[in-house]
Image (cartoon, rainbow, N blue to C red):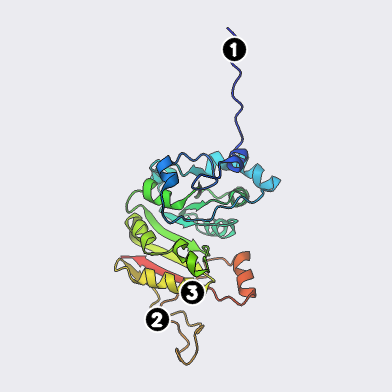
Amino acid sequence: MTATAPIPQQSPSARLSAAPAAYPAPMYPHKATEEQHRERRIRSFQPRRGRMTNAQASALDRSWERYGVPIDGTPLDLAELFGGLPVTLEIGFGMGETTAAMAAADPSMGILAADVHTPGHGNLLGMLERDGSQNVRLAAGDAVILLRDMLPDASLAGLRVYFADPWPKPKHHKRRLVQASFLDLVLPRLAPGALVHCATDWEPYAEQMLEVLSASPELENLHPEGDGTGWLEPADHPDGSVPGYAPRPDWRPVTKFERAGIAKGHVVHDLLFRRR
């Protein structure tokens, strides 16, 4: 008999780049069902395919099998995945600077970092290799599927949403991640005492976040008195505080994206809530 030639295996970076655009996220190795593909619901992302650098592709090929988690609907055992560490879910890590810095600063906290931006995965993997961090796993795909189908109830010690797409046009506000339907999905996955931390440089989105989070009786605002920055008119808040917003924690690094927003005159707002 003639031996059958083995099927060539694509590298992780090639599979990430070549995933069909019709997927919920342009990521491999996605196994979402046709029903999941077609469902009409809020997405946690705007698909982006940016070009990877050679360094990013190399980091993916070296380290994806070590750090990567496909968002394929399979339930995760976080205790096994993170060696028993408490786990914070970070949705939308961009190029990964904040994730890498916070992971290195606190190795006692596991970080499950979800995004759809392929170059960002490669960039973050390179930084994790550089720092030797072992407490991060990268989830490739739609965080809504991750939350809904893969994470057990009361399994998360925290949630981070930093500088999510603000969808500034009124007709697109329904696409914003932080809204009531998203919170209904998140809350059961948060353990008592879990920290919810959001940050945005888009003031109308900050107001929406504050309204949505404050409306939940299961969440406690850790800074109801305000952040002391006085970004509203002094006549409205003569004591210089804006109720509901938190001072920027010194443990949240300032990213290039954030500095660019500040340079444009944007004001960054942090929100810190705790699961009761």
Quick one: 86 or 195, which is closer to the camera?
195
Q: Using the image as rendered, state which of residue 42 and residue 276 is in the foreground.
A: 42
Residue 16, percent across and down? 58, 42
Q: Which of the two discs, 3 and 2, sits closer to the camera?
A: 3
Q: Residue at x 62, y 70 (%)?
A: 259
What type is the residue that disc 2 sits on?
Glu
Q: Which mark is residue 225?
A: 2
CA distance for labels 1 and 3: 64 Å
Q: Residue 159's quadrant in the figure?
A: bottom left
Image quarter where the N terminus lies is top right
Q: Badge 3 is on which residue?
A: 204
Front-most of 151 and 67?
Answer: 151
Q: Alpha-carbon distance for marks 3 and 2? A: 20 Å
The residue drawn where x is 37% and y is 69% is 213
Q: Name above or below for residue 14 compared with residue 210.
A: above
Q: How many marks?
A: 3
Where in the figure is residue 102, as x and y percent of width and height? 53, 59
Secondary structure under tag 2 reads loop
Q: Do we see residue 73 in this rendering?
A: no
Residue position for label 1: 3
- First reached walking from the N terminus: tag 1 or tag 3: 1
Q: In which quadrant of the rendered image does the C terminus lie?
A: bottom left
Above/below status of 169 relative to 88: below
